[in-house]
Image (cartoon, rainbow, N blue to C red):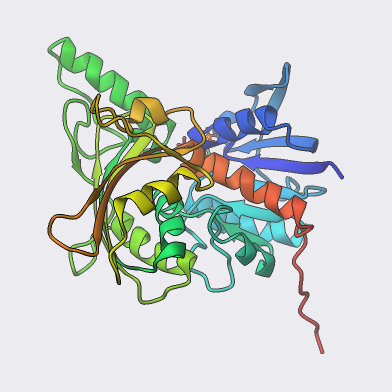
């Protein structure tokens, strides 16, 4: 049956990508409602040749809606998710608000699709860097369990939203004109610069983004003690993240095996031309569905270690695409409504 969908945060970077994906993937839509803040009241967005009106989200927004694709930030999700679920909708939430809630599945369809079955109305879309890493590491983990992951990320402006992407361009122009760049979305200039991810730090010195990679990977892989450490850095790239990943296995995994596994892994594209020194780059990953993986090498410092490099579109597989894939999974497995209803007695 065709599905009635609402996009909460339709005017944002992820929201507009959700619109594009619902069109290009021929999602079985019965109805599409575009929701944003009161700031966007009266705006229209084009969808399948029509101009759809953006509505400010309200108590009535979720009536007769089957799926809410939410990408309007954590506080907006916290404010509206329960209301949407009460109205009978399944909420696929892009924010970090519910990801670590044990009753909320945290799903990457290529990795842990079965986890979706236990949802109670909300399904969380993981953090973007975590999704890209997990898509590449999971297939290797199936061949030989990963013992330890050490990641360094090179993250694009898009993770901070559409205004941040505009700010990067404006900053670059300002600098090229000899002017002082304006910083609003970011704490420091990003153009011609980079800085450690600016989310709050814990007492051990890790920022929230780094801890998301630790905790979310453990939950998605269902390995609560998995050893993960990350250094997250924002770089002046528009919309694709890159990651250098070191993996340690219990037994050696050959480069040839890893390459073969990744060449056949869902959602992965192996990009390696050793002759030309050509490997994944953000400009090649931008606008693509797959995570580009390459530079698979033996870790020179450890017999059971592998090094790899990946790039993936932060807005697409890191957010909007993964959310639409979750919606498609719920439809295919008939999971739009929570499977178990708690009886009152
Ligand atoms: P709006 O454009 O009306 O501000 P991004 O991540 O690119 O910054 O986008 C954030 C999205 O979340 C936008 O669509 C934005 O709408 C929406 N949003 C932000 N705050 C709220 C809110 N309080 N209620 C509803 N939508 C919100």
Q: Is residue 330 left or right of residue 325?
A: right
Residue 321 in view in this figure: yes
Relative to residue 128, is residue 275 depicted above or below? Answer: above
**Is the C terminus in the top left, top right, bottom left or bottom right quadrant?**
bottom right
Q: Is residue 89 left or right of residue 296?
A: right
Q: Residue at x 39, y 69 (%)?
A: 145
Image spot of residue 172 (x, y percent): 23, 19
Image spot of residue 280 (x, y percent): 33, 33
Q: Residue at x 20, y 69 (%)?
A: 203
Q: Is residue 152 left or right of residue 6?
A: left
- The residue sitting at the bottom extreme is 345
Image spot of residue 319 (x, y percent): 50, 43
Image spot of residue 194 (x, y percent): 18, 36
**Is the N terminus in the top left, top right, bottom left or bottom right quadrant?**
top right
Q: Quadrant of residue 281?
A: top left
The tally of labels here is 0
């Amino acid at each position: 049956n065709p599905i009635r969908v609402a996009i909460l945060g339709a005017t944002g970077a992820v929201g507009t990508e959700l619109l594009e994906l619902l069109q290009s993937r021929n999602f079985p839509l019965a109805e599409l409602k575009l929701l944003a803040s009161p700031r966007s009241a009266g705006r229209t967005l084009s969808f399948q040749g029509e101009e759809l009106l953006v509505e400010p989200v309200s108590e009535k927004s979720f009536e007769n809606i089957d799926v809410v694709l939410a990408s309007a930030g954590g506080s907006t999700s916290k404010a509206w998710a329960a209301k949407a679920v009460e109205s009978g909708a399944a909420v696929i939430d892009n924010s970090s608000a519910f990801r670590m809630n044990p009753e909320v599945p945290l799903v990457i369809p290529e990795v842990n699709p079965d986890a979706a079955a236990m949802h109670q109305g909300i399904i969380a879309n993981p953090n973007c860097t975590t999704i890209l890493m997990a898509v590449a590491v999971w297939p290797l983990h199936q061949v030989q369990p990963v013992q330890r992951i050490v990641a360094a990320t090179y993250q694009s402006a898009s993770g901070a939203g559409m205004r941040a992407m505009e700010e990067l361009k404006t900053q670059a122009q300002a600098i090229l004109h000899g002017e002082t760049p304006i910083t609003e979305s970011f704490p420091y200039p990003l153009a011609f610069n980079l800085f450690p991810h600016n989310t709050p730090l814990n007492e051990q010195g890790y920022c929230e983004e780094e801890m998301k990679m630790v905790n979310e990977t453990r939950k998605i892989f269902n390995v609560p003690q998995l050893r993960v450490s990350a250094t997250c850095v924002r770089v002046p790239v528009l919309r694709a993240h890159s990651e250098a990943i070191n993996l340690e296995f219990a037994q050696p995994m050959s480069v040839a095996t890893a390459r073969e596994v990744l060449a056949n892994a869902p959602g992965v594209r192996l990009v390696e031309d050793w002759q030309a020194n050509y490997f994944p780059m953000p400009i090649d990953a931008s606008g693509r569905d797959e995570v580009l993986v390459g530079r698979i090498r033996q870790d020179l410092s450890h017999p059971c270690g592998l090094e790899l490099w990946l790039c993936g579109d932060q807005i697409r597989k890191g957010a909007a695409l993964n959310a639409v894939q979750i919606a498609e999974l719920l439809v295919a497995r008939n999971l739009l409504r929570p499977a178990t209803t708690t009886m009152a007695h």
